[in-house]
Amino acid sequence: MEIKDGWATDWGKVRFDVLVEETDLLRMLAARGVEDPAACAARMTTGDVFGIMSAEAAAFRHVSLAKQEPAQRETHMTEVAKHRAERNRLLDKYAPKKSAE
């Protein structure tokens, strides 16, 4: 699965494209300490994989827009937080973050 997201202005003269692939999903799982990210990913529903990857792509889109539109930075960063929270909610179903001790 691949999720593409982005934005463009002036008929594509200025643009940003992001592609999130399943290797990125494996990286997210590894960052959470999953010992076998591929096995964990294989247990995920297709809907959850799509949701995680789509939320990550949307977060990157808003990070880029925050740089492109500094006056709207706060709004875009709010959207980043919203999309990352959704990504984390879905990841938590399969790989809960370990609490700090």
Image: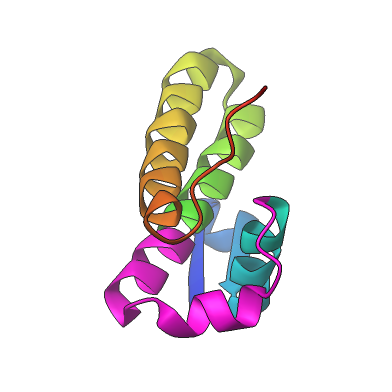
The quarter holding residue 46 reads: bottom left
Give the percent coordinates (x, y) of residue 43.
Answer: 42, 81
Q: With respect to residue 38, does 9 lie above or below?
A: above
Q: With respect to residue 78, does 90 lie above or below?
A: below
**Is residue 27 left or right of 54 when viewed as pictured?**
right
* Residue at screen point 67% across, 22% down: 101
Q: Which of the pair 82/27 is nearer the observer?
A: 27
Total labels drawn: 0
Q: Is residue 13 visible?
A: no
Magenta stretch in the rendered image: 32-54
* Residue at screen point 71% across, 67% down: 35
Residue 38 among those drawn in magenta: yes
Majority secondary structure of magenta residues: helix
Residue at the far front in the pictured view: 101
Give the percent coordinates (x, y) of residue 8.
Answer: 52, 54
Residue at the far left in the pictured view: 47
Q: Which of the pair 77/39 is nearer the observer?
A: 39
**Is residue 20 left or right of 84 when viewed as pictured?**
right
Q: With respect to residue 83, does 67 lie above or below?
A: above
Q: With respect to residue 28, does 3 lie above or below?
A: below
**Is residue 14 left or right of 91 when viewed as pictured?**
right
The quarter holding residue 39 reads: bottom right
Residue 45 among those drawn in magenta: yes
Give the percent coordinates (x, y) of residue 90.
Answer: 37, 54
Q: Is residue 15 visible?
A: yes
* Residue at screen point 50% across, 71% down: 4
Give the percent coordinates (x, y) of residue 3.
Answer: 48, 73
* Residue at screen point 42% across, 23% down: 78
The quarter holding residue 63 reads: top right
Which colour scheme appears in the figure? rainbow
